[in-house]
Amino acid sequence: MDETKTISGGWLRINWFGVPAGVLMIILPFLGTWLQLTFGEEAVIMEISPFDVGMIFLGEEMLISPLIFWFLLALKLGMVYFGMILLVGSMLYALDHNAKAVAEELVRFSARKLLWLVLSFVLGLLLIILIANFVPEIFTSMMGDTPLELQCDLPYLIGQGKVSVGLDMIHFICPVRMELSRAFLFAVLTLLLGTVSHAYQKRLS
């Protein structure tokens, strides 16, 4: 009877939000990029995430610098590390009822790491897009009367836009398309589970 109660109590002490969040954090860096940016009819394709960056120019894949490669690898390993800590912290209290404080500290330390990464990624992209959309106006105001016309209408993460350049009677228009991938949706799901797991861990008796 005591053994049955112990097993039952152990199940109740598992953080059921932290376990899937930890697993998803471990595999998330390997699910692919989060955003695809396409210029023209697939003339230039950029795929971006905090863990991977790729670009295809006229059908040829461009190589990234070794510095960027090692930086992205460090972010991948860091996310796997935090996912493992969250996974251990979510189950530790169930394995040892004396380790409640340690489990809470592990969950607190790791649960919100992805939240800040996703926010930094999204806000950084929005800032870059906002600046790019205002560059033509700044250029026009600085140059005054000039035959060169610039227009930039980039979509904010999702949708279609265009970049146009005009000089006298010649006009060049390049369509732009942005779309978020399924991997980004997994990232959002993971950060929600991680955020909830931080609050849930404190409620475990």
Image (tube, rainbow, N blue to C red):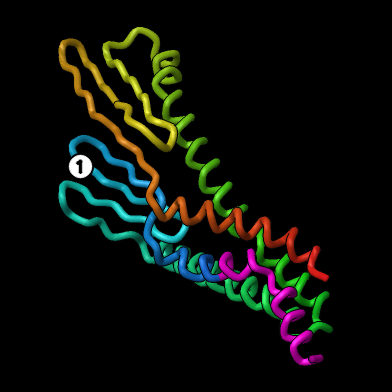
Residue sitting nearer the eye, 112 or 199? 199
- Point 44% across, 13% down: residue: 141
Establish if 65 lies above or below 23: above
Give the main secondary structure of the magenta stretch. helix
Q: Quadrant of the N terminus?
A: bottom right
- Amino acid type assigned to the residue bearing label 1 in the image: Glu
x, y percentage for residue 5?
78, 85
- Point 52% across, 43% down: residue: 122
Which residue in the protein does label 1 denote?
A: 42
Residue at the limit of the structure toward the top, as seen here: 145
Is residue 3 rendered magenta in the image? yes
Q: Which residues are magenta?
A: 1-22
Establish if 147 lies above or below 36: above
Task: Give residue 155's quadrant in the image.
Answer: top left
- Point 66% across, 63% down: residue: 111
In the shown orientation, is residue 4 left or right of residue 135?
right
Task: Give residue 66's quadrant in the image.
Answer: bottom left
Residue sitting nearer the eye, 147 or 80? 80
- Point 44% across, 33% down: residue: 156
Task: Give residue 99's quadrant in the image.
Answer: bottom right
x, y percentage for residue 43?
19, 41
